[in-house]
Image: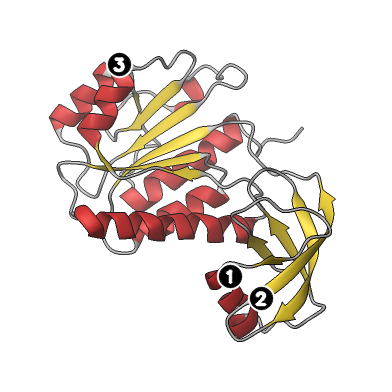
Amino acid sequence: MSAPRFHCPFPLSVGGQFDLSPQAARHASRVLRLRVGDSVVLFDGRGGEYSARISSVMKDSVAVEPQEWRDCECESPIRVTLVQALQAGEKMDFTIQKAVELGVSRIVPVVSRRGVMRLEGERAVRRVEHWRGVVVAACEQSGRNRVPELTELVPLERWLADRSLSENEGCVPLMLAPEATTTLDRLSVPHENAPVELLIGTEGGFAPEEMAMAERAGYVAIRLGPRVLRTETAGLAALAAIQCLWGDFRGG
């Protein structure tokens, strides 16, 4: 069995002693029941990882000692930003978790007109922090050593307006739309290091005005086959297809 992996949100170094975050410490001691001397893997998000050992286990804290740094990565060569309209219930957690496993490099949650969920003020701040925890946990599980960015929650109109005013040379902006006639395999392979943006609607899809605004901002409408996919399926299916066509799902 592979050693448990923990993200440490601070710089690590061989020979030092560091405390796991409170949440990680609780998971290590109460769920995994790790003890002094047990092996773990640590990563701080700057690349690579550390083999380490548990040096102490207290009631509310766990200390670890990094022993060796390993230069290993499993990042995709395609830098994909998932722009995901808010989903109801636990769908957003699921989508974020699986998007990280599929190699996404950034996630932008947006509020669209037809969205069922409404988040404002302190409730929105707490939910974004929760999602960032989901991102970290997915990195720990999937072996990623670089934590994808999850931005603040923004209205879709603002995201599109800011994007249309900024320079996005070389970017491949894509938007899933059931009525689109273009498919991924018909698109040109992105230039090396060219970022991809993937815009996914909510349960009710995008309003016509939002679709028009996205097209003016440069997004290309594509479809994934003849079936209409649910919002929690669409983005993940598109990410997997992108990795197969252009990313690290390919051989060689």
Instruction: Tell me whether the residue at label 1 lies in contact with that at label 2, contact meaning CB atoms closer than 8 angstroms.
Output: yes
Q: Quadrant of the N terminus?
A: bottom right
Q: Is 121 left or right of 246, judged from the image as shown?
A: left
Q: Amino acid at mark 2?
A: Val
How much space separates mark 1 and mark 3, taking CA atoms? Answer: 41 Å
Q: Quadrant of the C terminus?
A: top right
Q: Please tell me whether residue 70 is drawn above or below residue 161 in the rendered image.
A: below
Q: Nearer the viewer, mark 1 or mark 2?
A: 2
> Residue 67 location in percent, x, y?
85, 60
Q: Amino acid at mark 1?
A: Ala
| Tag 2 residue | 62
> Residue 148 location in percent, x, y?
53, 44
| Tag 1 residue | 24
Q: Please tell me whether residue 190 is drawn above or below residue 12 in the rendered image.
A: above
How much space separates mark 1 and mark 2, taking CA atoms? Answer: 8 Å
Q: SS for tag 2?
A: strand
Mark 1 vs 3, N-terminal side: 1
Q: Residue furthest front?
A: 16
Residue 3 seen by the camera? no
Q: Is 10 left or right of 203, judged from the image as shown?
A: right
Residue 19 seen by the camera? yes
Residue at coordinates 21% horizontally, 37% vertically from top-left?
206
| Crowdedness near tag 3: few (<14), some (14–19) or many (≥20) residues, C-alpha within 10 Å | few
| Crowdedness near tag 1: few (<14), some (14–19) or many (≥20) residues, C-alpha within 10 Å | some
Instruction: Tell me whether the residue at label 3 lies in contact with that at label 2, contact meaning CB atoms closer than 8 angstroms.
Output: no
Mark 3 vs 2, N-terminal side: 2
Q: Nearer the viewer, mark 1 or mark 3?
A: 1
| Tag 3 residue | 165
Q: Nearer the viewer, residue 189 or 133?
A: 133
> Residue 196 location in percent, x, y?
48, 27
Q: SS for tag 1?
A: helix
How much space separates mark 3 and mark 2, taking CA atoms? Answer: 47 Å
